[in-house]
Image (cartoon, rainbow, N blue to C red):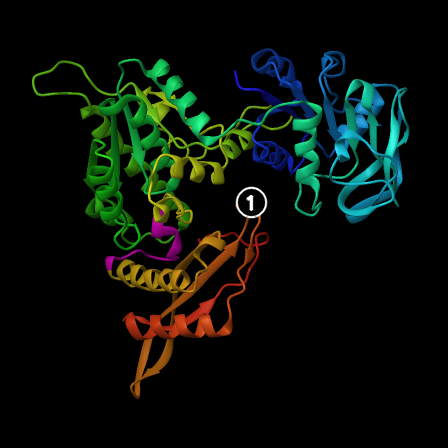
Amino acid sequence: MTDTVLIIDFGSQVTQLIARRVREAGVYSEIVPFNRAEDAMQRLNPRAVILSGGPASVTEMGTPRAPDWVFEAGLPVLGICYGEQTMVAQLGGGVESGHHREFGRADLEIQKPCALFDGVWKPGEKHQVWMSHGDRVTRLPEGFEVVAVSRGAPFAAVADEARRLYAVQFHPEVVHTPDGARLISNFVHRIARISGDWTMAHFRSSEIEKIRAQVGKGRVISGLSGGVDSAVASVLIHEAIGDQLTCIFVDHGLLRMNEAEEVVSLFRDAYNIPLVHVDAREKFLTALAGVSDPEKKRKIIGGLFIDVFEEEARKVGRAEGAQGGGAEYLAQGTLYPDVIESVSFTGGPSVTIKSHHNVGGLPERMNLKLIEPLRELFKDEVRALGRELGLPAHFIGRHPFPGPGLAIRMPGEITSEKLEILRKADAIYLEEIRAAGLYDIIWQAFAVLLPVRTVGVMGDARTYDHVCALRAVTSTDGMTADSFGFSHEFLTRTATRIINEVKGINRVVYDVTSKPPGTIEWE
């Protein structure tokens, strides 16, 4: 087993970022809800433990606590925010519901040297950190000392060096604590003495062994969407089991320009992976005719996709004249954030599995066993694995694309004519973004064809055509997002090209709504 840092989650909104910082330091980490920590301890045998923040108050009855073994096992422990408060309370210190709350940026004054600060901060210095707490520590347990303070937190950083117990009231995992990643690196390297050899190459080889052990001689099907996750998962599985894998690509007619050809050629030509290409465009567009409600669109697309996929999956492994056959496993590109979000910090089961994670319910309907080789990775780690596997840079750097495709970028009725208009506008928009060198710094960008027509003037003639909306956002995980700040010149140039080159559009607008209150996609 790889040396692991166990992160015990108390419900913080940024617990995932702790895992990210640990992994950036080259050390494998996993997040578990506080009430599942016992099982994780047995399974992982971690070299260190980090206690996350959380919304509860340790001053109230029935709020989460760390298991006693965390402080009895002799492991290095780092408590963050609520993690500090529960550590102090459980070890005999005092915590009070505060009259001195701190939210946002704060100045931290370093008072004493400690292993957590080695090479980063020195006594007498002040550094920016990010605070988000209503309670505060008022009395330290025996063996602890204060190593840093802030205006609202007289115990902003504390340490028991002898027992390798450290706690901070601020959040080192967020970018608003500029030196936070270095502090976490100190914890895992200097304090926990973990070497940091977890790389994508290491993950690749270990995951291949796992896949081979799980699958044996069985057959696997993978539903290719054209996105990064399913592509990387499929290439990794193919490296492990070769022709035992068959990819199924369903073209529902709602893809971007030339997308089907690109996906099919990549997998057939570049990787020589068995691929079933199903042209189901007519079936989908017929079923969507006259439908405007976005939820009905989703259900129609999801249901038809299952039907088509299920039909093709039954054929896999059935040679002429052979009896039985078919696939035993379904491969999915489920990522670590999906896994975390599916389990609440109180350990409750997920109410629903997102349709794009289980291909709309295929495991339940087809009784297939799941293979999820990416479930331990974040999105950027998947891209790193894609590079490790040799996928083309333009492919692994793709922006997210929704399962229902252009159907949810076209409010109102879907027609072949409108789809063609949208494809052309979207292609021009992305072409301009790439030409400006902006594609890789934007989380997601796309065009939307609105169910609105306006009057225009082109060549001294009156037009009455569609309005096209452009959307581009920056984000780290898609949970929140800000609109991208294009220059006026860029927007003008792009709008001019779209109006001139795409028949059917005479007006272009730019969406500056953040998430929340809006969503990234249009529906």
Amino acid bearing label 1? Met
Residue 314 falls in which quadrant of the image?
top left
The stretch in magenta equals 404-416
- Find residue 216 and report its horizontal and vertical position in percent: 30, 13
Q: Can residue 288 be seen from the camera position used here?
A: yes
The residue indicated by pointer 1 is 479
Residue extending farthest bottom: 460
Q: Nearer the viewer, residue 170 or 416?
A: 170
Query: What residue lies at 32% left-to-right and 16% top-to-bottom?
Result: 215
Q: Is residue 390 left or right of residue 9?
A: left
Residue extending farthest front: 119
Q: Is residue 390 left or right of residue 335?
A: left
- Find residue 125 and report its horizontal and vertical position in percent: 84, 46
- Find residue 491 and report its horizontal and vertical position in percent: 45, 71
- Find residue 482 and report its horizontal and vertical position in percent: 57, 56
Query: What residue lies at 59% left-to-right and 54% top-to-bottom?
Result: 517
Q: Residues within 10 Å of mark 1 (few under 14, many from 20)?
A: few
Q: Is residue 30 left or right of residue 259?
A: right
Above or below: residue 221 compared with residue 434:
above
Q: Secondary structure at mark 1?
A: loop
Residue 15 falls in which quadrant of the image?
top right
Query: What residue lies at 84% left-to-right and 30% top-to-bottom?
Result: 158
